[in-house]
Amino acid sequence: MIDPVNIAWKYLSSLTDLPQGSVTGDMVGRQAGDTTIYLAQSGGHRMVRDRMDRADIEYDVYHQDRAEASRLARVVRQALLEQLPGLAVDEALVLDVAEISSPRYYPDSTSREHMYGGEVSVFYVGP
């Protein structure tokens, strides 16, 4: 079984444009103020029986500086939409990525940190 969040995590973690160690699939151990790119699956479905899946992935970018949070969110957006399609990540072949929602500002309601979030659909096949 392929974990679609792991596809995005492995790909984004390999990028030098993003702070090392900032991409994560959980918030365990995160401290307020840490630069964080949090990935979570928000939905999806099987597109073609026994073959192709669609996974909706939300990305939330936290940073102490609002402008930097926005910039990093747009780096993530561009990487997912423009560079990930056509790549093999472990056992998955990413066929396409479509935007559901572009990054927009959502300050964290608890910590009041700057956070920009967006969402994409990742279309992939596996073994």
Image: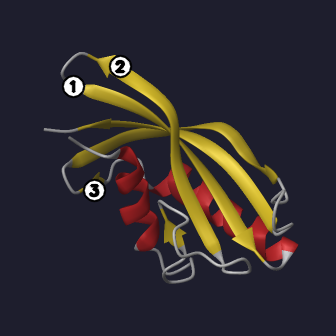
- Compared to 111, does 85 lie above or below? above
* Marks 1/2: CA–CA distance: 8 Å
Q: Quadrant of residue 60?
A: bottom right
Which residue is found at the position 36% from the left and 55% from the top? 6
Which residue is found at the position 82% from the left and 61% from the top? 110
**Quadrant in the picture for the C terminus:** top left
* Marks 1/3: CA–CA distance: 16 Å
Q: How many marks?
A: 3
At which x and y percent is residue 108? 80, 60
The residue that label 1 is drawn on is 51
- Compared to 88, does 113 lie above or below? below
Mark positioned earlier in the residue sequence (3 or 2): 2
The amino acid beneath tag 3 is: Val
Which numbered circle lies on residue 47?
2
The amino acid beneath tag 2 is: Met
* Marks 3/2: CA–CA distance: 19 Å
At which x and y percent is residue 119? 62, 43
Q: Quadrant of residue 63?
A: bottom right
Which numbered circle lies on residue 5?
none
- Compared to 118, does 107 lie above or below? below
Q: Are marks 1 and 2 in contact (CB under 8 Å)?
A: yes
**Quadrant in the picture for the N terminus:** top left
SS class of the residue under badge 3? Answer: strand
Mark positioned earlier in the residue sequence (1 or 3): 1
At which x and y percent is residue 45? 40, 23
Which residue is found at the position 61% from the left and 53% from the top? 59
The residue that label 3 is drawn on is 89
Q: In the image, 122: left or right of 104?
A: left
Q: In the image, 79: left or right of 60?
A: left
Q: Residues within 10 Å of mark 3 (few under 14, many from 20)?
A: some
